[in-house]
Amino acid sequence: MRVGVLGTGQVGAALGAGFVQLGHEVRMGAREPRNERAAEWARHTGHLATYGTFADSAAFGQLIVIATRGVAVEQALHSAGPERFVGKTVIDATNPLVSVGGGPPTLAFGESDSAGERVQRLLEGAHVVKAFNTAPSLRMYRPRVSGSPPEMLLCGDFPDSNRVVSDLLEQFGWRAVDVGGIRCSRYLESLALLRILCVQKTGRLDLVFRLVSV
């Protein structure tokens, strides 16, 4: 499968490398065609990894991963061209975080909206699935935890695409848990913020959430 990854940061690099390790062709997209971080990622990731612009990545991918900064998602999608996403499964791995005056991070959108919903509204013809946003980038592929695989929550309005992403999550080493429609992005993004606050409090970068029966 061809996978387009929009974003050159830690999340995009980790997910892109994970897809390559699973045998998929991956094209990382950036704002400019000769992005140094994207070029370095491709050199170190292998012959299945290439890079280009946001538009190149979106056109290339049969499945597309959005891994830009959360508050820059809409600008990136406009640059890529929403028409290039039509009919495709799109994984939104972003969190719309902001920090005011050096204080702790918070969500740019409150309880009445989310990045996931905004992406789905902008990409009207795509099938958006919120996933990966609640995990640290260094644990996104094959997380090493004791016992059974940890859970990854996902949500989206299109059951077939949710199943596609669930299968991919299991290949990445997670147990997928579908929690509902794209509106549930509000809760997944809040959960991601809570994880970040826990990281800041404890200093543990590798924290993941588990669901357990008691």
Image: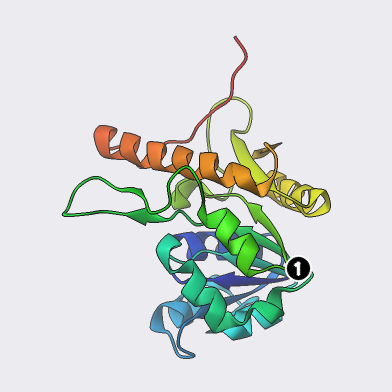
Residue lying furthest top? 214
Query: Measuring 60% from the left and 84% from the top, which residue is drawn there?
Result: 55
SS at mark 1 in the image: loop
Question: Vertically, is 170 above or below 29?
Answer: above
- Determine the residue positioned at 42% across, 36% down: 207
Residue 125 sits above or below residue 146 on the image = below
Residue closer to the observer: 41 or 154: 154
Q: Residue at x 60, y 42 (%)?
A: 184
Tell me where residue 17 appears, x and y as whole percent: 56, 64
Q: Which residue is mark 1?
A: 88
The amino acid type of the residue labelled 1 equals Lys
- The x, y position of residue 81, in whole percent, is 62, 82
Question: Seen in the image, is 89 located left or right of residue 194?
Answer: right
Q: Quadrant of residue 119?
A: bottom right
- Please report the residue visible at 65 percent of the width from the left and 75 percent of the height from the top: 48
Quadrant in the picture for the C terminus: top right
Residue 50 % position (x, y): 59, 81
Q: Nearer the viewer, residue 196 or 87?
A: 87
Residue 51 in view of the camera: no
Can residue 50 be seen here? The reply is: yes
Q: Quadrant of residue 37?
A: bottom left
Q: Is residue 37 left or right of residue 86?
A: left
> Is residue 46 left or right of 43 when viewed as pictured?
right
- Vertically, is 209 above or below 157? above
